[in-house]
Image (cartoon, rainbow, N blue to C red):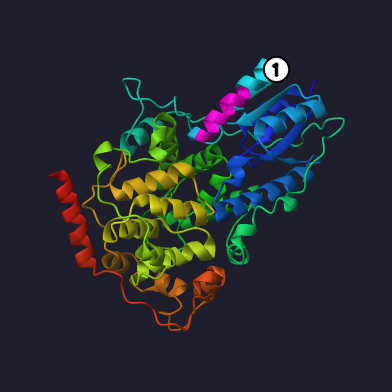
């Protein structure tokens, strides 16, 4: 009955946690642990701040169950070895992650622990299906979404495991560090107070978010999800990022909604969104190079521009294109951005400004509280045209026509751009509170003129594309 160390990473929940359910079934004492290693300290300012909030909430959940979360900082293998020595634990269990850095680290830890005679096991739980479970008829992996969705939806997704009522505690606990002593959220600066008003942190908040969505917005989701001013989306990407809700729990609730009468028309589209998240992780597992270089070699010599003053205006939400700027400012105020706006701001940077998509990818990784390595890389490459399931390069989102179609009453633009609103609202003014002081922004300053004429920017991008093809 040696204790088990349960190493929590992106699975900060009790419900629908396969690792935790299996550990409780053993009857062994359990030592929940969170480690701030390089994968944590190396995160961008916003996702690092948000992860710390999630860890704090998870620790409170465990305390309410009569147990605790042990916190340690340092290289994961060294920390785990120390905890084993201090607690007499017989092994370490964890939930799987699929990016190449996590896989390399976890494989090395598993080998080292097993060589030393300790049990080391990894478990599913981050995705609806493991990357090696959904295969083509030839045994390969899917590269594009539609056939992947058909294959995944034809599978039986395992039922979510119930939350245990209690966790067996060890006879004695190893020492824990104090979360606040790590100062991991400091880089957010004054923006933390603004973003905290919009974040929904912890397992209880995630489940409430799902139920709220299924009780109302799901009925309008299919038609309204592209309109950024509408309250039609679930917002669950934030909670899925940190594992505060399990994908199998969402899938099971969606299936219940689809079996109900009347059937909510938007429920299937939520399921498709879960499949989109799954294929992103499947692709980084099967083709890890997708996270850094161009996905296709023929794009290596494309004349992308590097960082520039124009890209800096894009970062600051001062391009002079209201829909682009509203999306960027929403990110600073709420920590997230509506998906339609993400496509528009990414297209504007990579095509109208001809800037390397990796400049934008890096900035999103710094600023999004729902940042996900797979979704971020795949989303940018889809828009830029260089990914495995990409929009063609000549599909260039026009911010003006997109705004007219999806924000016809200007509600979204007025919400986040105080300079354009007849009566600026709190979110629009909060942008100036959340933005770095070094930007020296003033809500009384006039709204800037556009960086580039949209027709000229489009023509320049298409000319570069045609020249590359020749």
Query: Secondary structure beneath disc 1?
Result: loop
**How many numbered tags mark residues here?**
1
Pick the quarter of the image with the N terminus: top right
* Residue 148 against residue 221 in the figure, above or below: above
Q: What residue lies at 56% left-to-right and 51% top-to-bottom?
A: 47
Residue range in magenta is 101-110
Say which quarter of the image contains residue 199.
Answer: bottom right
Q: Nearer the viewer, residue 288 or 205?
A: 288
* Residue 244 in sight in this render: no
Which residue is more in the foreground, 12 or 79? 79
Q: Which residue lies at the image location 54% right of the left edge and 45% below the top edge?
A: 240
Q: Residues within 10 Å of mark 1 (few under 14, many from 20)?
A: few
Q: Is residue 108 magenta?
A: yes
Residue lying farthest to the left in this orientation = 470
* Res 403 quadrant in image: bottom left
Q: Position of residue 79 (x, y in %)?
A: 71, 33
Left or right: where 351 falls relative to 54: left
Towards the viewer: 221 or 244: 244
Residue 326 on image: x %, y %: 41, 68
Q: Residue at 58% across / 41% down in the picture?
A: 39
Residue at 25%, 44% in the rendered image: 301
Is residue 153 shown left or right of residue 467?
right
Note whether residue 376 is visible.
yes
* Horizontal arrangement in the rendering, residue 173 relative to residue 272 (left or right): right
Residue holding disc 1 = 116
In magenta stretch: residue 53:
no
Q: Quadrant of the C terminus?
A: top left
Residue 272, horizontal then vertical, whole percent: 40, 43
Q: Position of residue 125 (x, y in %)?
A: 56, 33
| Magenta span: chief secondary structure | helix
Question: Most extreme residue toward the right, as rendered?
Answer: 171
């Amino acid at each position: 009955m040696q204790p088990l160390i349960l190493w929590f990473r992106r699975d900060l929940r009790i419900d629908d946690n396969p690792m935790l359910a299996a550990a409780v079934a053993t009857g062994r004492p359990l030592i929940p642990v969170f480690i701030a290693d390089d994968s944590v300290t190396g995160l961008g300012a916003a996702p690092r701040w948000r992860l710390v909030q999630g860890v704090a909430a998870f620790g409170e959940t465990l305390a309410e169950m009569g147990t605790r979360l042990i916190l340690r900082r340092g290289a994961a293998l060294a920390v785990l070895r120390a905890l084993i020595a201090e607690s007499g634990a017989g092994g370490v269990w964890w939930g799987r992650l699929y990016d190449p850095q996590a896989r390399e680290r976890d494989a090395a830890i598993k080998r080292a622990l097993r060589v030393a005679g300790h049990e080391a096991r990894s478990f599913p739980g981050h995705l609806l299906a493991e990357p090696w479970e959904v295969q083509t008829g030839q045994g390969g992996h899917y590269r594009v979404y539609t056939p992947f969705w058909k294959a995944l939806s034809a599978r039986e997704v395992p039922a979510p495991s119930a939350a245990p009522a209690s966790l067996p505690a060890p006879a004695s606990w190893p020492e824990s560090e104090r979360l606040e002593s790590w100062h991991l959220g400091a880089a957010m600066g004054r923006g933390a107070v603004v973003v905290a008003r919009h974040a929904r942190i912890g397992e209880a908040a995630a489940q409430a978010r799902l139920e709220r969505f299924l009780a109302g917005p799901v009925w309008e989701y299919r038609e309204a999800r592209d309109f950024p001013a509408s309250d039609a989306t679930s917002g669950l990407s934030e909670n899925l990022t940190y594992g505060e809700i399990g994908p199998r729990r969402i899938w099971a609730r969606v299936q219940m909604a689809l079996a109900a009468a009347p059937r909510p028309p938007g429920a299937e589209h939520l399921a498709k969104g879960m499949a989109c998240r799954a294929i992103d992780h499947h692709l980084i597992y099967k083709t890890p190079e997708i996270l850094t270089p161009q996905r296709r070699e023929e794009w290596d010599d494309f004349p992308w521009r590097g960082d520039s003053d124009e890209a800096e205006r894009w970062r600051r939400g001062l391009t002079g294109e209201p829909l682009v700027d509203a999306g960027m400012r929403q990110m600073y105020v709420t920590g997230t951005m509506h998906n339609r706006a993400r496509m528009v701001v990414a297209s504007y940077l990579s095509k109208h400004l001809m800037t390397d998509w990796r400049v934008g990818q890096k900035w999103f990784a710094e600023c999004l509280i729902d940042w996900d390595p797979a979704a971020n890389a795949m989303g940018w490459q889809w828009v830029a045209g260089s990914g495995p399931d990409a929009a063609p390069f000549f599909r260039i989102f026009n911010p003006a026509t997109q705004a007219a179609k999806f924000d016809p009453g200007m509600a979204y633009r007025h919400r986040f751009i105080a300079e354009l609103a007849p009566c600026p609202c709190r979110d629009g003014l909060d942008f100036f509170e959340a933005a770095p002081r070094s930007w020296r922004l003033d809500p009384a300053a006039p709204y800037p003129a556009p960086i580039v004429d949209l027709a000229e920017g489009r023509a320049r991008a298409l000319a570069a594309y045609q020249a590359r093809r020749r």
